[in-house]
Image: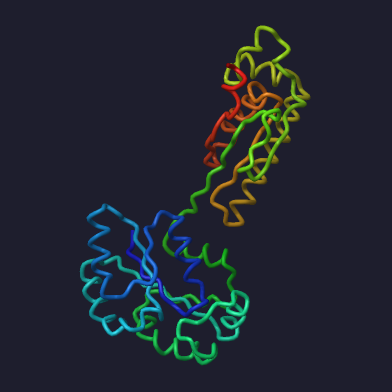
Amino acid sequence: MPFIVVSGLSGSGKSTVLRTLEDAGFFTTDNLPPELWGAMHDLATARGLERVAISTDARTRDFLGALESSYERLSRRREDLRVLFLEATADVLLKRYNLTRREHPLGDSLLVDFARERELLAPLRSIADTVIDTTDLSAGELAERVLKLYRLERDFHLRLVSFGFKHSPPRDVDMVLDVRSLPNPYYDPALRPRTGLDSNVADYVFQNEDAEAFYADLRDFVRTAAERARAAGRHGYTVGIGCTGGQHRSVAVTERLAADLKALNVEVGDHRDMKLEAS
């Protein structure tokens, strides 16, 4: 896995790239002077960190005199050292700055700053393995390009949580589903003390064609919502499945969804109210 140096013009997308790499499991450090590249490499190696990305740009202008020697020393130790440089046209950078209302690190008028910054960072651009013009790229498109460039996969998880409406729905979910229309095992005295983890309870919940049809629609809806979230660049999506008490139907549905949607890296976060009801 390469040791990546990210650089480029202010407003060209460096923060997006660092966030993307961090989400992909990289240890990231922003605004690191070239003279400290080697020290960071040694520290990461000592800690067993295989994925490291650092950022160096105009904010480290007082230290860029050591760029060439620092790069040569590190490249001799790391054959997989990679330098990614980002740029964009001045008019696009100006629009981005006007939206964020940030000050340019060089602190002059913006158009003058952009020109000075290009000249200042020319040595970094000259050693870059890859230069990406982000003029026409959205943040999501830039993230996807970086993932493909370094052959990284976006880590996505679908998290499922069961609950009981009488204990209030969870607040930390993206979507809440109501499964109270399914057959309720609570009214069977033999099943009442059991939970949706019990196969007999699950058989009762999905006992007829109407219940199966309802579940199929719900499963397909969850799959579509999760896949759209992943396509939009999300790294996770959480669905709360609720019945009345959170012991039978919601638990059975959550477990079945986890089995049917395992391709989406499902994790069952919690059967939040199951123990509460069973106690």
Which residue is more in the foreground, 212 or 11? 11
Does residue 238 sit above or below 60 in this rendering? above
Asked whether 226 or 167 is in front, the reply is 167
Q: Residue at x 23, y 76 (%)?
A: 72
How is the rendered protein coloured? rainbow
**x then y, percent, for residue 70:** 25, 76
* 130, above or below 238, in the image: below
Q: Considering the image in quadrants, where does the C terminus appear?
A: top right
Total numbered labels: 0
Identify whether 265 is placed above or below 155: above
Q: Is residue 185 left or right of residue 159?
A: right
Q: Quadrant of residue 1?
A: bottom left
The foreground one among 259 and 111 is 111
In which image quadrant can residue 22 be found?
Answer: bottom left
Give the x, y percent position of residue 211.
Answer: 75, 24
Up-down relation of residue 118 to residue 274 (above or below): below
Q: Residue at x 39, y 87 (%)?
A: 120
x 53%, y 67%: residue: 142
Q: Residue at x 39, y 57 (%)?
A: 26
Q: Position of residue 91 (x, y in %)?
A: 60, 85
Q: Residue 176 in the image: x percent, y percent?
A: 69, 39
